């Protein structure tokens, strides 16, 4: 058991008790505080009370499904920064897109092996690095971003980025592993500017890959992009 994880709260939501037991067992072994709910309405009550760091949410549930539950969670001010990942046997693109559109941060497809599941959970929780948004320097693997100096380093080599490329990189790197939709990227990087659309994003992503290498920015087909290291 990892005592460092004892302060981390995780809420598991699934209408199958066997799955809750299985996931709880593996997360408890890692030392996390685990709460469970069999439906969306109970999940909302527990989330309001406990304010977990992460919510693992099944998509297909009776009465109030995962999509509706996620949408409701994002309307609660105290839960606006809670990480949410869907866990579902449904792997269709439209199901994942629906999840990201209501505010999910990730999407895990089941069945999933215990070690893979806990690894994904750890990766999600790493996004909770304190004050990451306020830090003037962000280090991700061998990539270092100095926001104040508008500089990017790969190892000891400085790489020059124009304003929009730099802003796009900072956005993607702000939450490693999080999938950013094309619509959100356009809104955050280009705002009200007149742009071509998806083609504009694709060109800038290609330029980032040319300078950083192909291993850092992943394309999620039909949805958007994420930064991994």
Image: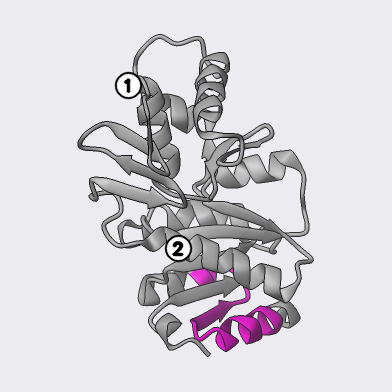
Q: Where is residue 221 in the image (x, y as percent from the top left)?
A: 69, 34
Q: Residue at x 57, y 14 (%)?
A: 199
Q: In which quarter of the image is residue 61?
A: bottom right
Residues at discs 1 and 2 in contact (Cβ within 8 Å): no
Q: Is residue 49 above or below residue 203?
A: below
Q: Residue at x 67, y 61 (%)?
A: 87
Q: Where is residue 23 in the image (x, y as percent from the top left)?
A: 66, 78
- Look at the image and say whether residue 41 sits in the magenta stretch: yes
Q: Which residue is drawn at 35% across and 61% down?
A: 129
- Label 2 neighbourhood size at 10 Å, few (<14), some (14-19), many (20+)? few
Question: For the magenta stretch, what is the residue range?
Answer: 20-43
Labelled disc at residue 163: 1
Q: Where is residue 162 in the image (x, y as percent from the top left)?
A: 35, 19
Whole-Å distance between the Cαs marked 1 and 2?
A: 27 Å
- Look at the image and say whether residue 80 sits in the magenta stretch: no
Labelled disc at residue 114: none
Q: Residue at x 52, y 55 (%)?
A: 70
Task: Name the element at disc 2.
Answer: helix
Residue at which label 2 appears: 126
Most distant residue in the front direction? 156
Q: Position of residue 11 (x, y in %)?
A: 51, 73
Left or right of 124 on screen, residue 138: left
């Amino acid at each position: 058991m990892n005592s460092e994880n004892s302060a981390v709260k995780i809420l598991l939501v699934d209408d199958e008790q066997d799955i809750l037991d299985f996931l709880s067992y593996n997360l408890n072994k890692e030392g996390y505080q685990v709460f469970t709910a069999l439906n969306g309405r109970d999940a909302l009550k527990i989330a309001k009370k406990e304010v977990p760091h992460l919510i693992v949410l099944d998509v297909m549930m009776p009465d109030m499904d995962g999509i509706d539950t996620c949408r409701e969670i994002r309307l609660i001010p105290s839960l606006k920064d809670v990480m949410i990942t869907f866990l579902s046997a449904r792997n269709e693109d439209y199901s994942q897109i629906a999840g990201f559109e209501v505010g999910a941060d990730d999407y895990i497809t089941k069945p999933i092996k215990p070690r893979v599941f806990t690894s994904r959970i750890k990766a999600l929780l790493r996004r909770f690095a304190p004050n990451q948004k306020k830090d003037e320097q962000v280090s991700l693997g061998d990539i270092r971003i100095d926001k104040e100096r508008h500089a990017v380093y790969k190892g000891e080599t400085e790489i020059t980025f124009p304003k929009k490329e730099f802003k796009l990189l900072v956005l993607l790197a702000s939450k490693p592993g999080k999938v950013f939709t094309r619509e959100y990227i356009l809104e955050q990087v280009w705002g009200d500017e007149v742009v071509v659309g998806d083609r504009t994003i694709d060109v800038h992503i290609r330029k980032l890959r040319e300078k950083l290498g192909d291993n850092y920015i992943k394309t999620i087909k039909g949805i958007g992009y994420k930064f991994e290291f």
